[in-house]
Amino acid sequence: MINNTRNLINEMIKKTETIANFISDNQTNEFLPSYFDKLYENLKDLNNRSEKYTIGLILIIFLHLIFGQNTIESFSIGPINIKDISIIPKVLPILIIYAIFNLYSIQHQKNDLINALKVHSFTFFKQKYTSEDLKNNNKLTYITRLFLPYSFSNMVTSLLTEKPSKLTSAIGFIILLPTIALGLLPFAFLYQMLESIFNKYYNDTLGFISFWLSIWVFVLTIFYIVINAINESNEEKKLLEED
């Protein structure tokens, strides 16, 4: 099975090649299973963190809808009494862009872990696989899906990477279309929050800092996404040139 992995290296992305070489070079190392056990636990931890940030994102949007109406003058949380509620809409943009950035970075790390565990699953459990299985990070065999811890994103991804009929594809697209829209919704609320700060609190010190800090983190997030995409594209092109 290791030899089969070696033969398909030229058709694999760089990260997958690195993992395959690592497994091949350390297949007699008694600590190799422990290493992948650690990766499995890390993936479970990232799944939990992703769920928490998602819940946090929903709560932030909920708070924006409540406190953005200017109908609440003060509120209390236990012994804490907040009289100036303008503090909340001022800090919400920072919180929402922080959650978005962490969700993306977590998903990026999850992809790397899933890719490593996928190659480990192919070799350790002696599965039959093709070069396409190794090239496509999102494509998981049935055995590998059973091996990985559950997450909602993996479940949706497995549906999208199968080869359904045209009718199933059409129905699936209609069903998943709102999900795609929901993915863009946080950015729409971020725009609303920044617009509210600019119109109401821009001359306030906290409002000014929140406005520009949120924009800076947003630009940093976009930069992070673009750089990762460019690096992965360059790695694949470099690998093809070596062939």
Image (cartoon, rainbow, N blue to C red):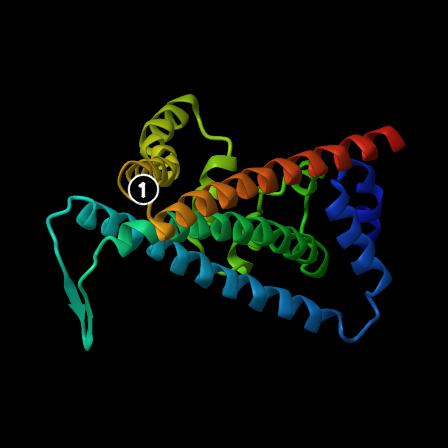
Q: Vertical placement of 119 versus 193: above or below?
A: below
- What is the number of callouts on the image? 1
Instruction: State the residue position of label 1.
Output: 197
Badge 1: few (under 14), some or many (20 or more) residues near its Cα, within 10 Å?
Answer: many
Percent coordinates x, y for residue 29 in the rendering: 82, 72
Picture quarter containing residue 166? top left
Residue at horizontal 25%, vertical 47%?
A: 64
| Front one among 197 and 104 | 197
Q: Amino acid at mark 1?
A: Ile
Percent coordinates x, y for residue 17 in the rendering: 78, 47
Residue at horizontal 67%, vertical 36%?
A: 132
Residue 203 visible:
yes
Residue at horizontal 44%, vertical 25%?
A: 165
Residue 150 visible:
no
Q: Vertical placement of 122 versus 222: above or below?
A: below
Percent coordinates x, y for residue 86 in the rendering: 24, 53
